[in-house]
Image (cartoon, grey):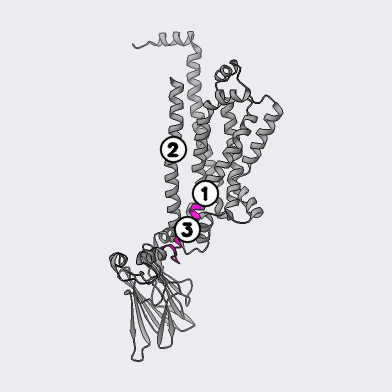
Amino acid sequence: MILTEIQKNDIAARYPGVFLDAGRRSIGAWAVAAGIAAYLVFAWWFFSIGAVFANARWEIAGAYLADWVSYESRPNVRFQGDSLRVSFPRFDPMGRNPDPDWLERTSSASGEVVRAVVDMSGAGRIDIAPGRVTVTRGGETLVADIVADERVDASGALPEWAAQRAPGQKVIVDFGFSGRAEIEDDEVKIRHRFLGWANFLFDPDSPFWNRSAVEVLSLVWSGERIDPQRSNLSLAWNNILYNAEWQHLDVWTKLLQTIVMAFVGTVLATLVAFPLAFLAARNITRSVVVNQLSKRFFDFLRSVDMLIWALFFTRAFGPGPLAGISAIFFTDTGTFGKLYSEALENIDDRQREGVKSVGASPAAVQRFGVLPQVLPVFLAQSLYFWESNTRSATIIGAVGAGGIGLKLWEAMRTNSDWENVAYMVLLILAVVFVFDGISSYLRQRLIAPEASAKSS
């Protein structure tokens, strides 16, 4: 049915409130949208977000991300008159006396190295000879003449993948993901990157190092004993646990500390907040003074961030899990107290009055009239915070509260062990995913029966 204009005006005259409210709602929605848009524009200007994106050094961020999934070998080729000296760092992933197939050395009759050619995994080549370095990449060639201990002279214009701040200074050559090289007046520093995690299972000190998986399994299963005092399986497992580069046993131990910190802190907070919440609930404890003191105590505990508590307890107890447990305990006691007391204040008083009407004692009234209503909610909230505290324990560990957070921070501070950082982050993610699933399952088991009981 289509209304005429006269009918519309007649309805609007008889029911002005309906049309007025609709108009107000429409104006209100547009006002909210305009306010949000204005705030976003203000935030963009106030925090200079455009300038931040424009001035960001995205190449550094890309290098960090690449370091998460790769490792570098760092040979140095030093000029020594008419010869070269090729050396690797002490803890290079290639081992103690590396002789990789991507670095070709040419020696003279006297045994001195007179030429070194580095293949950057197909991304380019670096041909190093006394007094001259020739770099080839993508069909372009850069020739740099070396005046020993004085200057580096690049012949012609530099290609896009090379940079030199000033004439005579070092030349930096970029090969993308494959790495880079720095050509200086006394040496060439090479950073050759490879995809993967080097020596993840066995370090260069292990007899299983640099062996294929088939060779390792063959030795473990039926090979002659490497160490007469133990089996090859026991030796292999020991070498994995005490891997000097990845420190698996220490990482797993610290991860277990983090899990224990979250669990113990949450359990203690639950046990302390549970009775205190009854004091803060106005319908349970009728004293206004006790209510206010309890609630202000909860406000004090949760108003101080967990990270601040962790810093305080680290100074008080020293670095370690005890500081982390205390920080979680204090913060969660305040949070649980507030949540529990609010749940108590919203219970159905008819159940409590029913228990009281049969002459039950005050303790029995709380036991049978209150607890059945709130206990599933209490446990569900505690389970959620247990899962959340597993993540929080990692953060507070970085300030000295122990656990894997402290080890993660130590790896990040070196600015070179980003593959170790990625390893620990993946372990933390796996633990959080598992605990999230367990917590969600248990909460559903607790709340679903309660919801179905109320609906019936």
As drawn, which residue projects farthest toward the bottom?
A: 110
Please tell me which of labels 3 and 2 falls first in the chain: 3
Question: Could you say which disc has been placed on residue 37 in the image?
Answer: none
Residue to which mark 2 is pinned: 440
Please tell me which residue lies in front, 115 or 27: 115
Residue bearing the label numbered 1:
260
Measure how far apart labels 1 and 3 are at the Cα level: 14 Å
Q: Earlier in the sequence, mark 1 or mark 3?
A: 3
Q: Residue 147 placed where, x, y %?
A: 45, 83
Amino acid type at circle 3 is Val
In this view, the residue in front, 207 or 232, is: 232
In this view, the residue farthest toward the front is: 229
Observer-side mark, 1 or 2, equals 1
Quarter-of-image position of residue 441 = top left
Q: Amino acid at mark 1?
A: Val
User: Secondary structure under badge 1?
Assistant: helix
> What's the mark number on residue 251?
3
Q: Is residue 55 magenta?
A: no
> Is residue 135 shown left or right of residue 60?
left
Cα–Cα span, label 3 and label 2: 27 Å
Boundaries of the magenta span: 240-256
Q: Name the residue at 59% across, 44% down.
A: 329
Viewport quadrant of the C terminus: top left
